[in-house]
Image (cartoon, grey):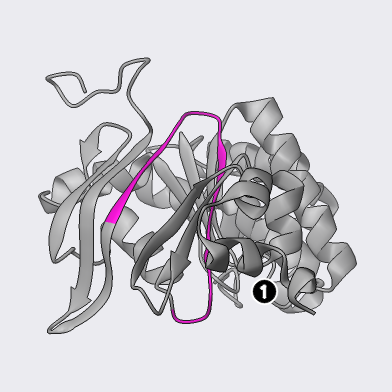
Amino acid sequence: MAANGATTPETPIVDVRNLRMAFGPKVVLEDINFKVHKGEIFFIGGNSGCGKSTLFKHIVGLIPPAAGEIYVDGMDAVNFTPKEHQRLLRHVGVSYQGGALFSSMSILENVCMPLREFTDLNAKEREAVGMTKLSLVGLAPAASKLPAEVSGGMLKRAAVARALALDPDLVIFDEPSAGLDPLSSSDLDRLIATLSRLLSTTFIIVSHELRSIFSIADRLLLLDAARKTQVGLGPPKELRESSPDSWVRSFLNPGAAA
């Protein structure tokens, strides 16, 4: 890492070291170590209650860890001032589970929200950027619609457009396929893969969907609720076929146990 906190070509965009996550005496996860490299589609997966979404919140500085270090785009995501946290968030696009769009605002207005908060662009300039992002995800015709007037799949695409509004180096999705039918979920996977190629953006995706993991993930961090730690890290097909951990192989190939 450069002395000024900036990334170098060798610097991972996310670097998590010896992370311990806990709420009081209750340990959620410990001994978490991984790096995410520029341009990767990196999944965080695991069984129910393993701490996937909690880890996501630690990465963006919403929850402080009990111990360990987290660096995002060369910035300390653990020890920061409010101003430094705003700078971190400026470099990270986030899409929360369910999309979290404002129901009283149009799709375009929702996409423009980060531009209002983090830039000095005027309304016309914000609208131009917002329409560009909506065009990227195929939603330009729905710009004036309210969230209640579009399908679940379109809502997810709108959330993707909003996460891309500031041209972030990193985009993090929390369960992006939740509530979608298989066809819409597959469409969303293809969109993410296309955006990754077009924009060279790094994606971290919190998901329990094995179909999505095997479809588009470059690497997978697999967590286990029982052991409260990571149990696998690597390309998902390699983990499924040759992990030394039998639980990992079974989790990634549930049909084999039938």
Quarter placement of the C terminus: bottom right
Q: Which residues are magenta?
A: 32-49
Report which quarter residue 49 is drawn in.
Answer: bottom left
Q: Give the residue at x 18% y 64%.
A: 64
Query: Compared with residue 6, is residue 190 higher up or lower down, i.e. above or below?
Result: below
Q: Which residue is mark 1?
A: 178
Count of residue discs = 1
In the rendered image, residue 97, in percent from the top left (x then y), is placed at: 55, 71
Q: Specify the farthest residue to the top.
A: 9
In the rendered image, residue 248, in percent from the top left (x then y), is placed at: 56, 62
Q: Main secondary structure of the magenta part?
A: strand
Query: Compared with residue 121, is residue 172 higher up or lower down, i.e. above or below?
Result: below
Q: Nearer the viewer, residue 14 or 151?
A: 14
Residue 33 located within the stretch drawn in magenta: yes
Instruction: Give left or right: position of 234 versus 8.
Output: right
Q: Nearer the viewer, residue 82 or 204?
A: 204
Q: Nearer the viewer, residue 234 or 5?
A: 234
Q: Give the residue at x 36% y 63%.
A: 55
Q: Give the residue at x 58% y 40%.
A: 124
Q: Specify the farthest residue to the bottom.
A: 25
Query: Compared with residue 116, is residue 169 higher up or lower down, i.e. above or below?
Result: above
Report which quarter residue 255 is drawn in.
Answer: bottom right
In the rendered image, residue 231, in percent from the top left (x then y), is placed at: 43, 59
Q: Specify the farthest residue to the right.
A: 183
Amino acid beneath label 1: Ala
Helix, strand or loop at disc 1? loop
Q: Is residue 8 visible?
A: yes
In the rendered image, residue 233, in percent from the top left (x then y), is placed at: 48, 48
Q: Residues within 10 Å of mark 1 (few under 14, many from 20)?
A: some
Q: Is residue 144 visible?
A: no
